[in-house]
Image: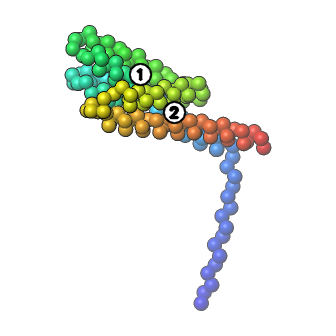
Amino acid sequence: MKQKEPTPKRVTTPVSYEVAHNRAVRQYKKMSIFILWAGVLNVVSTVIAIFQNSTDYSLCFSFNNVIFLILGQSTPLLKIIIVLIAVASGALFAAVGYFASLGHKAFLFTGAIAYFLDFVVLFIFINPSNDGYLTSILIHAMLMIAIMFSLFAYYSVLAIEKKYNKE
């Protein structure tokens, strides 16, 4: 009987600082950009709802949704005001997301806290019988998970920097 040859042991080489750091930074940038996309989604969904003469603002920020439902959209002026509110809040979130993706801790935490508070507003002020309530919960949950991953990735970058600076 032929004896089985032992499999050679794998030699693992330690990952260099540059490789580990660049990988963590890329992951952080991918996840933190979701704050920017939350702002873009807010504007696009508002414009679509206005053009469809709908009051389904389920893909918008919850605080915008509350304002829009209070205003209604009975006149062209109100429709313009609703779009301007959406553009202002969407642009603000997009700017926060952009600066967060550049690694600015204050913008990352501001975006995370603001979106979390927006998620809370959804449960407090939005009527669960609204058409897009479940859709709004799912979108908010997905974006919150992405934002939490960006926070984790941010601290991963810091941990890598700390680890390699000690050696």
Looking at the picture, the colour scheme in use is rainbow
Q: Position of residue 28 (x, y in %)?
A: 55, 37
Element assignment for label 1: helix
Q: Position of residue 88 (x, y in %)?
A: 41, 16
Q: Which numbered dot is residue 90?
A: 1
The residue sitting at the bottom extreme is 1
The answer to whether residue 109 is left or right of residue 36 is: right
Foreground residue, 36 or 81?
A: 81
Above or below — where is 83 with respect to 143? above
> Number of callouts in the render?
2
Q: Residue at x 67, y 49 (%)?
A: 15
Above or below — where is 114 with respect to 88? below
Quarter of the N terminus within the rendering: bottom right
The answer to whether residue 96 is left or right of residue 19 is: left
Residue behind mark 2: 32
Mark 1 or mark 2, which is nearer the start of the sequence? 2
Q: Position of residue 34 (x, y in %)?
A: 46, 33
Label 1: few (<14), some (14–19) or many (≥20) C-alpha neighbours in 10 Å: many
Q: Which residue type does callout 2 highlight? A: Ser
Q: Which numbered dot is residue 102?
A: none
Foreground residue, 9 or 74?
A: 74
Classify residue 50 by image quadrant: top left
Q: Residue at x 51, y 23 (%)?
A: 96
Q: Which residue type does callout 1 highlight? A: Gly
Label 2: few (<14), some (14–19) or many (≥20) C-alpha neighbours in 10 Å: many
The answer to whether any part of residue 11 appears in the image is yes
Q: Residue at x 22, y 11 (%)?
A: 75
Element assignment for label 2: helix
Q: Residue at x 30, y 26 (%)?
A: 57
- Mark 2 to mark 1 CA distance (whole Å): 16 Å
